[in-house]
Image (cartoon, rainbow, N blue to C red):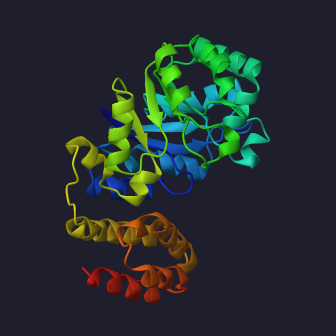
């Protein structure tokens, strides 16, 4: 089984990826949150920092590109390959944000199948490196995916990563396994599953339903439980009571916190990042609701550090 770390905008940047990779194992590919090229430039300074080889050492990283212009995609692909040495890039057809969708990008591009076909034709006539696609199954209805699969099957994608929700679902409802199963049978390209794998039990249900699936992308599940990929590889909980994993989370937290303080200016910016971390990681402390609320209310780093000491002292 190949396991991938999904790109989560604003969360899994290079600081997070490096801290995670220094503590946890089990991930075959790290997908870099999307780059948005335009007519003036392929990558902005923030995106360049995220893709720099020195910020992605010892990991297989895949930059994701968000655009509906083949020219912009190809320019970014060329720069990523020639200047930064990347071997693979990913096209984002999954982002459900209204701002993105209104511009016909992300999952909004799925509502323009003829334009998408033309886009992919131009890309594959000119691109030199491997291209994968991360997609939803349509804009409004899963019935849209049949015609989309016909388009994807015309091109040599290195992988088709399917999140079986439509755009209007956002992250609500449950993934549509019926449509995913049909896509698994019809796809001429290797298929990767993405969507709502939060626990080892979720993964086991997926494998029982789709024994031929050989690639799984994990996203929010890894933010909630950073050891999830390791548990999937072992096919058992490495620490059923969670004591050792909370200690390891402390090491991860401290590395992440120190690194954010080094690269960010201002207490508010660092606190924002760490509070965002706890939106997901608080799952590991279900009995500490009051303390978690206090952590999220802190307005100074010294307060935050005090609350964190209290939290981990409970172990």
Residue closest to the eye, 268 or 222: 222
Image position, residue 275 (x, y; %) = 50, 72
In percent of the image, x 60 and y 46: which residue is there? 173
Residue 68 at least partly seen:
no
Q: Quadrant of residue 233?
A: top left
Residue closest to the eye, 248 or 162: 162
In percent of the image, x 32 and y 37: which residue is there? 28
In percent of the image, x 47 and y 44: which residue is there? 6
Residue 297 at least partly seen:
yes
Image position, residue 38 (x, y; %) = 72, 38
Quarter of the figure with the N terminus:
top left
Image position, residue 96 (x, y; %) = 67, 44
In percent of the image, x 68 and y 40: which residue is there? 167
Left or right: 25 as drawn, with respect to 97: left
Q: Where is 216 relative to 269, above or below?
A: above
Residue closest to the eye, 99 or 281: 281
How many marks overall? 0
Left or right: 56 as drawn, with respect to 121: left
Left or right: 42 as drawn, with respect to 100: left
Residue closest to the eye, 277 or 188: 188
Quarter of the figure with the C terminus:
bottom left
Q: Where is 119 relative to 301, above or below?
A: above
Q: Where is 62 relative to 219, above or below?
A: above
């Amino acid at each position: 089984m190949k396991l991938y770390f999904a790109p989560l905008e604003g969360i899994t940047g290079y600081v997070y990826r490096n801290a995670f990779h220094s503590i946890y194992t089990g991930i075959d590919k790290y997908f870099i949150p999307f780059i948005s090229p335009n007519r003036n430039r392929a990558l902005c300074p923030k995106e360049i920092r995220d893709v720099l080889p020195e910020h992605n050492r010892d990991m297989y990283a895949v930059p994701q590109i968000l655009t509906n212009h083949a020219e912009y995609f190809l320019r970014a692909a060329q720069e990523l390959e020639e200047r930064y040495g990347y071997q693979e890039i990913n096209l984002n057809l999954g982002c459900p944000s209204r701002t993105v969708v209104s511009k016909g990008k992300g999952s909004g591009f799925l509502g323009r199948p003829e334009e998408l076909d033309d886009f992919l034709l131009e890309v594959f006539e000119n691109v030199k490196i491997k291209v994968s696609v991360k997609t939803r199954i349509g804009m409004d209805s899963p019935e849209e995916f049949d015609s989309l699969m016909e388009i994807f099957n015309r091109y040599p994608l290195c992988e088709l990563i399917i999140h079986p929700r439509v755009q209007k679902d956002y992250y609500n409802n449950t993934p549509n396994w019926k449509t995913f199963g049909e896509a698994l049978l019809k796809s001429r390209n290797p298929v990767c599953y993405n969507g709502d794998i939060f626990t080892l039990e979720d993964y086991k249900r997926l494998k029982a339903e789709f024994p031929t699936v050989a690639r799984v992308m994990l996203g929010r599940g890894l933010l909630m439980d950073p050891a999830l990929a390791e548990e999937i590889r072992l096919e058992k909980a490495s620490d059923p009571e969670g004591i050792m994993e909370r200690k390891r989370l402390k090491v991860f937290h401290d590395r992440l916190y120190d690194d954010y303080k080094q690269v960010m200016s201002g207490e508010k910016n660092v606190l924002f990042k760490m509070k965002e971390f706890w939106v997901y990681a608080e799952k590991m402390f279900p009995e500490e609701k009051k303390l978690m609320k206090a952590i999220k209310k802190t307005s100074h780093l010294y307060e935050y550090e005090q609350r964190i000491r209290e939290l981990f002292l409970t172990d």
